Amino acid sequence: MNIELLQKYCLSLPSVTEDIKWEHDLVFSIGGKMFCVASLEPPFTFSFKVPDDEFEELILKEGLKPAPYMARAKWILVEKATIRTTKEWEKSIKISYELVSAKLTKKVKTELGLL
């Protein structure tokens, strides 16, 4: 996984927007809610939300740790993208997308064409 593949995959998901926040982070959102954040500065790292019941197990793995400022919301920081294949990362990012989009209001989901 690299920044180009991450960007291509995230933008392939329905109703996703991207913008730059905090001067050096590429942020992918659904309905104005972040589901994935990647650093634009080396080294390549990215963060995303994980299911609550998987958080504690994942942060024990080499190359993963609680995401700064977002760990309380069960986000992990990937410091070593080579520990999984691109397809495995895509699956995890899709889960993050689904977790975040599930929390959107019915009105927002309707506006985005998700219902």
Image (cartoon, helix red, strand yellow):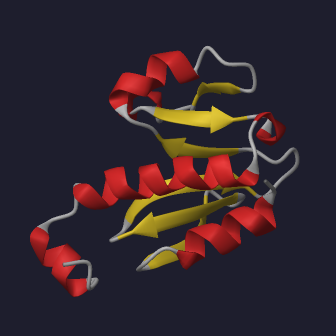
Quick check: can you spot residue 61?
Answer: yes
Q: Residue furthest left?
A: 106
Find residue 24 and report its horizontal and vertical position in percent.
72, 58
In depth, the one of 68 and 31 nearer the eye is 31
Residue 32 in the image: above or below residue 95: below
Q: Is residue 79 above or below residue 13?
A: above
In this view, the residue in front, 97 or 17, is 97
Image quarter hosting the C terminus: bottom left
Q: Left or right of 5: which side holds 67?
A: left
Q: Residue at x 24, y 57 (%)?
A: 102
Along the line of sight, which residue is nearer the eye, 21 or 15? 15
- Kindly identify the residue that appears in the image at 39 percent across and 68 percent down: 30
Q: Quadrant of residue 113?
A: bottom left
* x and y percentages locating residue 70 in the rendered image: 47, 35
Q: Is residue 19 visible from the viewing direction of this image?
A: no
In the orientation shown, which residue stands out farthest toward the right? 42
66 over 108 or under it: above or below = above
Instruction: Tell me the residue at 28%/83% (across/down).
Output: 112
Mark count: 0
From the top left corner, tell me how far across and down residue 5 is, in percent.
75, 66
Q: Residue 84, position in %: x, y?
A: 74, 39
Vertical placement of residue 37 versus 109, above or below? above
Is residue 34 found left or right of 104 in the rendered image?
Answer: right
* Residue drawn 44% across the image and 50% down it: 96
